[in-house]
Amino acid sequence: MKEFQSTLPVSALTEDKRIVFYKKTYTNLALAVLLFVIVEWAFFQSAAIIEFAYSMTQGWRWLLMLGGFMFATNYAEKLALTNHNINQQYAGLLLFVVAEAFIFIPLIGIATVIAENGGNNILNQAAILTLSLFTGLSAIALLTKKDFSFLRSILTIGTFIAIGLIIAGALFGFNLGLWFSVGMVILASGSILYQTSNMVHKYSEDQYVGASLGLFASLMLLFWYILSILSRD
């Protein structure tokens, strides 16, 4: 068992220790993205898993799927952020990655079909756009060292509004439209600034797994809605 050894925020550490923390955090983030790709590929090797995932996208089943996703990811965040056992922290990150990979099945399936039918490879386009925007926003937060904690209330309100609209759309059968996705891209961008700021001003030296999970969650949210926009006819 490895316990947190410091309660000081990363910003209060020496430069060498900050660099080590950042390296650990972004290494774990890169490994999480790689694992996401591997798990997604594995899911697409099973027709049963694909069929089940698609069956959960209709009406109230989509709400059930979202509820399960939120439960799994909240539990994963609790493991990664509040648990003192490093193995359980990584278990939380693993659970989060698997949950993300599963909920992405229908959207990635649509992108694959578009490419197979002679359309643009929007999956690669979305990945490039997401990584470019993520890198730029992270650089802003890291280089300016600004505390973006004030975004928390805005992100919380925006998330509840988004959840309400998603529930209403699923229950009453209306499409949320392009502007909803654009709004969610803005929300995800704010989340990246907030999570990167947290990495500097909130997390302690031994919380690099939790920091990487927060960044991964924001990255995946951004990727989802950029891919959704590109998938539109």
Image (cartoon, rainbow, N blue to C red):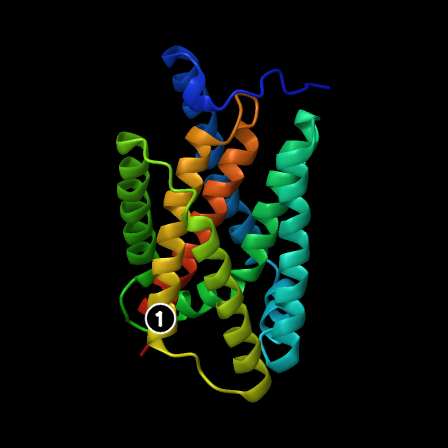
Residue type, mark 1 in image: Ser
Q: Residue 201 location in percent, x, y?
A: 44, 30
Rendered position, 15 above or below 228: above
Q: Is residue 230 left or right of residue 100?
A: left
Q: Is residue 217 left or right of residue 85?
A: left
Of residues 187 and 101, the one nearer the viewer is 187
Of residues 13 and 170, the one nearer the viewer is 13
**Number of other residues with Cα within 10 Å of mark 1, as a class: few under 14, some 14 to 19, many 20 or more:** some
Q: Residue 44 location in percent, x, y?
A: 55, 58
- Residue 16 visible, this angle: yes
What residue is disc 1 on? 231
What residue appears at the point 33 percent right and 45 percent down from the top-left corner? Answer: 134
Of residues 221 and 6, the one nearer the viewer is 6
Where, by quadrant of the figure, is residue 76 drawn? top right
Say what secondary structure mark 1 lies in.
loop
Rendered position, 23 above or below 146: above
- Residue 26 visible, this angle: no
